[in-house]
Image (cartoon, rainbow, N blue to C red):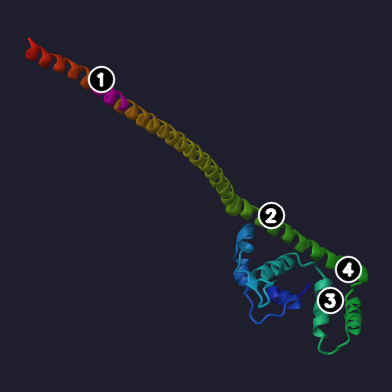
Amino acid sequence: MIENNDLLKKIKGLFIVSDGETSAETINNTPANDVTTNYAGTVSVSDDGNVVMNEKHVQMLMTAIQQNNMEGFDYLEYKNSLKSISNVISDETMRYKSAFEMAKTMGLDKKKLLDSAAFYLNVLGGEQKKFLDAIENQKSKQIQGRVNTIEDLDNKIVEKKKTIEQLNKDLESINEQMSVLKKEINEEVTKIEVTNKQFMASYEYVTSQIKEDIEKINTNI
């Protein structure tokens, strides 16, 4: 096992080259069971628009490796050896072989090396599962509720549109009734006026005869 007072920082240094590092103390003080909080962080975006690594996410993955660091000389120690000779041996093949020759003196064989590397992949796979579960939980709490609200509002819009359509039909029907009534009123007014004129003409004709008879009676009798 790597012996170092700042193990987390050293493990991180094996995988990430960073100008600034979040302290192990900050990460270790985060509740281990609060996966959503652990994986929360500001998403970084590069100039070309691609999402890049997030410091806190990297720290969480490194913490998982630290907490599951296997006893003895394994993949992590081998990777540390690779890093330590990187400035000395530029050829990659020679570097991997040289680091392995040093590792063999510590009792590491190829199978154990590969098995331990696979072990850490499984550890990170477990962290990925926790992260994806946390994401789904966040979707359920923060997104699905809003999606349901949108669906409810869409349904209300549909109902309101149906109500408006019905009201428009009702208004159209009322306007048609009003048009019919106005037409009937005009027709009745015309009939009444004609009837009135007919009556007055008849009245004038009959009364004029009577008046004429009265005048003739007074004159001739």
- Closer to us: 185 or 13: 185
Is 182 displayed left or right of 64 in the figure? left
Circle 1 is placed at which residue position? 202
Q: Position of residue 84 (x, y in %)?
A: 80, 84
Q: Which residues are magenta?
A: 194-201
Of callouts 4 and 1, which one flags the residue occurring earlier in the amino acid sequence?
Answer: 4
| 204 part of magenta stretch | no
Which quarter of the picture shows residue 108? bottom right
Q: Position of residue 33 (x, y in %)?
A: 64, 57
- Closer to us: 213 or 130: 213
Q: Secondary structure at mark 4?
A: helix
Q: Amino acid at mark 3?
A: Tyr
Q: Nearer the viewer, mark 1 or mark 2?
A: 1
State the residue lying farthest toward the bottom. Answer: 88
Callout 3: few (<14), some (14-19), or many (20+) C-alpha neighbours within 10 Å? many
Q: CA distance from mark 2 to mark 3?
A: 32 Å
Callout 4: few (<14), some (14-19), or many (20+) C-alpha neighbours within 10 Å? few
Circle 3 is placed at which residue position? 78
Of callouts 1 and 3, which one flags the residue occurring earlier in the amino acid sequence?
Answer: 3
